[in-house]
Image (tube, rainbow, N blue to C red):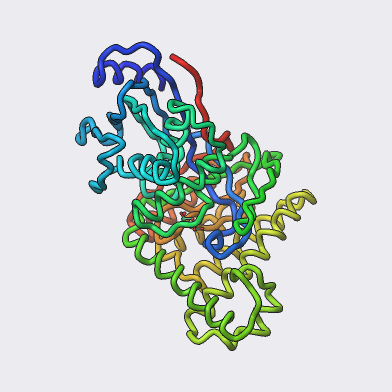
Amino acid sequence: MKEIMLKKFIEVFGEKNNKEYFFTPGRVNLIGEHIDYNGGFVFPCALDFGTYAICSRREDNTFRMYSMNFEKDGIIEFTTDSLIKTNVWADYCKGIVDVLIKKGYKISKGADILLFGNIPNGAGLSSSASLEVLMGTIVNEINSLNIDMVEIVKVGQIAENQFIGVSCGIMDQFAVGMGKKDNAILLDCNTLKYEYVPFKLDGISIVIMNTNKRRGLADSKYNERRASCESALKDLQDNGVKINALCDMTLEKFEEVKHFIKSEEALVRVRHAVSENQRVLESVKSLQENDIEKFGKLMNASHVSLRDDYEVTGKELDSIVNAAWEAPGTVGARMTGAGFGGCAVALVKNESINDFIKFVEEKYTKETGLVPAFYVANVGDGSKKLGDI
Ligand code: GLA
């Protein structure tokens, strides 16, 4: 990859001394969906594919950026005092610079940056968080800001919320920034306390299934779900329920106070959030007890809750997950990410992977007319500088 990018870099920006090489992965969430913004626990891991950058520092405050994934856009140029949203991929990078400046960091040096990503866009594997955290890592390095990765992660989320306008939670940026090879991250989104949990399973692989249905309207529906949760939280607090976030409740507590939630729709959304939080904790426990069958069942139950209560799956995700449930070698399967299309994740016994893929592909294509893609994923490290070139 490096060689191809290097060649392109010289073609686009000319020969430069002192080039640096960076990488930020994508992520897959194993369990704990749509609860990062409800103060819950999530359990994602970083992947071994993601976004790469070759960059050369500049002495002025100009950034010139070129993406091999969007060659038709050419070089996108901006300075630290012209951060205007133009609705292309570079907005994620401008957003990072904007938030860093607003937080008071001094950014005097720009860079010429060539990017290449191998995360499918819009598939729910966090290509945007990957780009944001990559930019944060680069700007931090070239301006010697000395900010730690958790701060870069927070900057990424603020950029997405305020510059891009999507009210996402912290999970994606955290996973791609803080990932660790062969480990998943148990993250408490309330406190940002986290724990690495080894996730290298004997004889079992993570198989990501891309429905190849793009997440149309995902952002507006995502914001709607968040609004429902916020209104339910307000109903509960107005009636004296002492919680700061929905996931502060156990299922028992929820049963006791659910009549305070005015809308029937919000009520089932909350049932998902509270039950999903419990499933995350149970699934990590089952992993620690080496009970992978139970982990798989909890993944399946997560999908059912996202389908019936949170209503974020849709025809394609349901079809691919149903097929996975019936396929040879499956331990568990569920949608992953925001939903409404994009990817699902399955744990599959190694000896059955080929049969699994064949079975799911045939059944899914027959039902939807779409051709899915499959990636057998390795769990990789978070964002980092790979070296000097
Ligand atoms: C998107 C958001 C995350 C999270 C997931 C759903 O990926 O960016 O913050 O809410 O959806 O779990």
Residue 325 screen position, x and y as percent: 56, 58
Is 352 situated above or below 247? above
> Which residue is painted at 30% across and 32% down in the image?
67
Query: In the picture provided, is 61 more to the left or to the right than 49?
Result: left
Residue 180 screen position, x and y as percent: 62, 36
Residue 291 screen position, x and y as percent: 76, 52
> Which residue is painted at 55% across and 53% down in the image?
327
Residue 197 screen position, x and y as percent: 70, 44
Residue 384 visible in the current orientation: yes
> Which residue is painted at 71% across and 78% down in the image?
252
Is 383 situated above or below 235? above
Query: In the picture provided, is 184 more to the left or to the right than 323?
Result: right
Pick whichever, 376 or 275, lies toward us.
275
Spot the residue most to the right.
Answer: 289
Q: Quadrant of the C terminus?
A: top left
Residue 326 visible in the current orientation: no
Is 317 situated above or below 142? below
